[in-house]
Image (cartoon, helix red, strand yellow):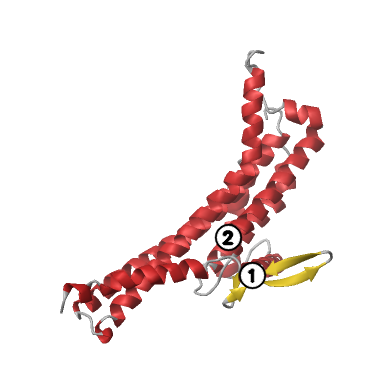
């Protein structure tokens, strides 16, 4: 068997990866471009990402209602105990440990972000699913909501001038204040961008890596049946093992990214309402 035949799976990988990237296009739904739906005076493209975004919202609601229904002073069952454990951990570390003023008031918002993004991320591990966190428009929508929310809280708490003046830490020399204020103001405007990109980049990259390992596993399995070297089939279990490892890692990444997004939301809220903002 020629060297070209043994290298054929890797050459075929290029075309398969292009197809993979095309399938992750946020405007694709069942092979076609997003179908426009008339809403008031505008048309909105309905993509698979939007469908799974709404599905994640529904699943999150069902989980919350289920947890509320089964919650008790002494929970019975492993599922409800695990749910309470996650809720208590998220609340203590994301809310009570970060927001120093009226933390309980913001717990529902922070926990909603955490569970909604976690459900989205976990949906992305199911073959064929395209969660909202897998596209920049989805994560940008979440980040903009957080930005509007903490800005509104800051303006409500301190007023317009007080909020803007509070961007500069206390105790700085007067000649430094204008420069620091400008840097902090630009940094504030950049928050939704970095907030959205961090979540999107991690989830999108994970989907691509898992897709590539899955493609390599398939290509090396079918190589002998396409007249290529049987030695290629021996490499297939290696790629499959790497795929399983990456799959397990993505479960961890899904939870970590949901936690980080909610944590940053809590940090931004605390900065907006605290005196030291």
Q: Looking at the image, do the residues carrying marks 1 and 2 touch, with CB atoms under 8 Å apart? A: yes
Residue at the far right in the pictured view? 40
192 to the left or right of 252: right
Crowding at mark 1 (Cα within 10 Å: few <14, some 14-19, many 20+): many
Residue shown at the point (81%, 37%) measured from the top left: 156
Location of mark 1 (residue):
47
Where residue 36 sits: x, y (%)? 72, 71
The label on residue 87 is none
Whole-percent x, y for residue 13 in the image:
35, 70
Quadrant of the image occupied by residue 18: bottom left
Residue at the disc numbered 2 = 135
In the image: residue 138, left or right of residue 201: right
Vertical comparison of 92 with 158: above or below: below
Q: x and y percent of residue 151 in the render?
A: 74, 40
| Disc 2 packing (10 Å; few <14; some 14–19; many ≥20) | many
Viewer-nearest residue: 238 or 84:
238
Up-down relation of residue 44 to residue 270 (above or below): below
How far apart marks 1 and 2 lie (CA) works out to: 11 Å
**Rendering quarter of residue 16:** bottom left
């Amino acid at each position: 068997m020629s060297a070209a035949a043994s290298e054929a799976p890797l050459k075929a990988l290029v075309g398969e990866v292009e197809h993979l990237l095309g399938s992750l296009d946020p405007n694709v739904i069942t092979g076609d471009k997003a179908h426009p739906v008339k809403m008031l005076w505008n048309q909105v493209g309905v993509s698979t990402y939007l469908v799974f975004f709404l599905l994640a919202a529904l699943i999150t609601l069902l989980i919350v209602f289920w947890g509320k229904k089964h919650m008790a002073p002494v929970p019975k069952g492993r599922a409800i105990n695990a749910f309470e454990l996650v809720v208590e951990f998220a609340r203590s570390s994301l809310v009570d440990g970060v927001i120093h003023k009226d933390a309980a008031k913001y717990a529902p918002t922070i926990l909603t972000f955490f569970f909604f993004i976690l459900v989205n991320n976990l949906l992305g591990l199911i073959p064929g699913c395209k969660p909202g966190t897998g596209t920049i428009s989805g994560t940008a929508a979440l980040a903009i909501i957080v930005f509007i929310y903490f800005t509104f809280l800051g303006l409500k708490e301190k007023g317009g001038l007080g909020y803007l003046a509070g961007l500069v830490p206390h105790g700085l020399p007067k000649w430094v204040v204008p420069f620091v204020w400008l840097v902090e103001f630009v940094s504030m405007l950049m928050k939704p961008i970095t907030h959205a990109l961090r979540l999107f980049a991690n989830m999108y990259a994970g989907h691509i890596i898992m897709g590539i390992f899955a493609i390599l596993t398939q290509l090396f399995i079918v190589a002998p049946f396409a007249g290529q070297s049987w030695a290629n089939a021996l490499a297939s279990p290696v790629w499959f093992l790497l795929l399983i490892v990456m799959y397990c890692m993505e479960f961890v990444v899904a939870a970590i990214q949901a936690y980080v997004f909610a944590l940053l939301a809590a940090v931004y809220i605390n900065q907006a309402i605290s005196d030291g903002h």
